[in-house]
Amino acid sequence: MAAVVIGHVGGEIAVPGEVCVKTGIRTREFVVLRGSTTPPWVNVLIVFTVIGWLWASSMAARRYRVEVPFLHRHWDRWRRIRRTAVLVALIGVILACWASVAGIPHSAAFLSLTVGGIALGIGNSLLNTVGLTQRGDLLLLTRVHPDAVVAIRAGLSAARRVSQPGTGARST
């Protein structure tokens, strides 16, 4: 999987192209991703102070809204597995608490469900969805199918040519 710069952080972005960012299949289905991102330097602060990290994260966070071409069946699969992972992790915590209160020996073994749920959630995110990260002032879409990268770059360069009409070939 590849990565592609899609625009500047802090606004609404519509990713060009009609190629699913995860599968590389042509589609007219879109998904809206909302969230916030912080510069990488903020994460260094967690080593020194959690309160400083929280303060810097809140002050440096920049929100985004990105509309990406994404097949709905693949997006729905990611959401279904995510819900399952959260449920398994939560059941593991509840069973571990119940077993320890009830005096069942080796009650911490139920926490293996929690670890399994967390592992399922991380694996699901890495395999079934895309990521968004900040590099300087640019927003980078990660874990993108190579065919989608080509379509996005072609769409972005076409948009630049349209927005800057004076940069084309000159006739004399």
Image (cartoon, rainbow, N blue to C red):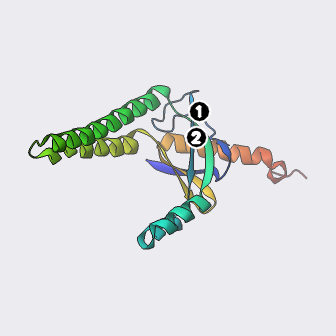
- Dot 2: within a 10 Å radius of its alpha carbon, few (fewer than 14), some, or many (20 or more) residues? many
Task: Give whichever of discs 1 and 2 has the lower sequence position.
Answer: 1
Residue type at tag 2: Ala
Q: Which mark is residue 18?
A: 1
Amino acid beneath label 1:
Glu
> Farthest residue in the bottom direction?
48
Give the distance between the C-alpha atoms of the residues marked 1 and 2, in whole angstroms: 7 Å
Name the one closer to the observer, 55 or 144.
Answer: 55
When the figure is inspected, residue 164 is found, relative to residue 44, above or below; the finding is: above
Is residue 113 in sight in this rendering? Answer: no
Where residue 45 appears, as percent x and y from the top left, is 48, 70
Callouts 1 and 2 close, C-beta under 8 Å: yes
**166, above or below 154, in the image:** below
For label 2, the residue is: 151
User: At 62% from the left edge and 47% from the top edge, which residue is drawn?
Assistant: 64
The total number of labels drawn is: 2
Q: Viewer-proximal residue, 107 or 48?
A: 107
Assign a secondary structure to mark 1. loop
User: Residue 114 shows which numbered tag?
Assistant: none
Density class for disc 1 (Cα within 10 Å; few <14, some 14-19, many ≥20) is many
